[in-house]
Image (cartoon, rainbow, N blue to C red):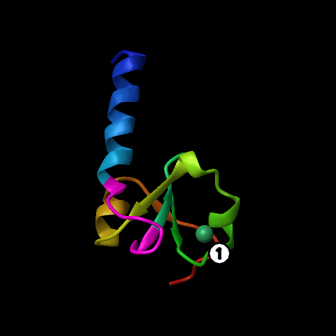
Amino acid sequence: MSKSLVMIILREDIQEFNNSNEQECDFVLNAHTKKIHKKDCSSVEQMSEENRSYYKGDINALLDAGYSACKSWNP
Ligand SMILES: [Zn+2]
């Protein structure tokens, strides 16, 4: 698989889960590290805007896609 094709797939993955906004989302995702953060997680503030995805929906869809909950989060 070419590098450019991988990039396209990654971008689509980010878009898929960027379906909400800062106020409405259930989770804030770091598309770079593939971590799931709660909205009130302190890491979110330190995350660069371009790596953030705002997701509203079932967390299992994120886990299936290779995302994992961040360290400061113990469900
Ligand atoms: Zn976090």
Q: How many marks are shown on the rendered structure?
A: 1
- Determine the residue positioned at 34% across, 47% down: 15
Query: At numbered mark 1, what does the secondary structure look like: helix, strand or loop?
Result: loop
Q: Position of residue 23 (x, y in %)?
A: 45, 74
Q: Residue furthest top?
A: 2
Q: Residues within 10 Å of mark 1 (few under 14, many from 20)?
A: few
Q: Residue furthest bottom?
A: 75
Indicate the quadrant where residue 70 lies.
bottom right
Q: Is residue 67 left or right of residue 15?
A: right
* 66 magenta-colored: no
Residue labelled with disc 1: 72
Q: Is residue 14 left or right of residue 32?
A: left
Q: Position of residue 24 (x, y in %)?
A: 39, 74
Q: Is residue 15 above or below residue 40?
A: above
Residues in magenta, as a range: 17-27
For the stretch drawn in magenta, the main secondary structure is: loop
Q: Position of residue 7 (x, y in %)?
A: 41, 27
Circle 1: residue type: Ser
Ligand 1 within 8 angstroms of badge 1 C-beta: yes
- Determine the residue positioned at 40% across, 72% down: 25
- Determine the residue positioned at 29% across, 50% down: 16
Q: Is residue 29 above or below residue 16?
A: below
Q: Closest to the observer: 60 or 49?
A: 49
Q: Closest to the observer: 1 or 53?
A: 53
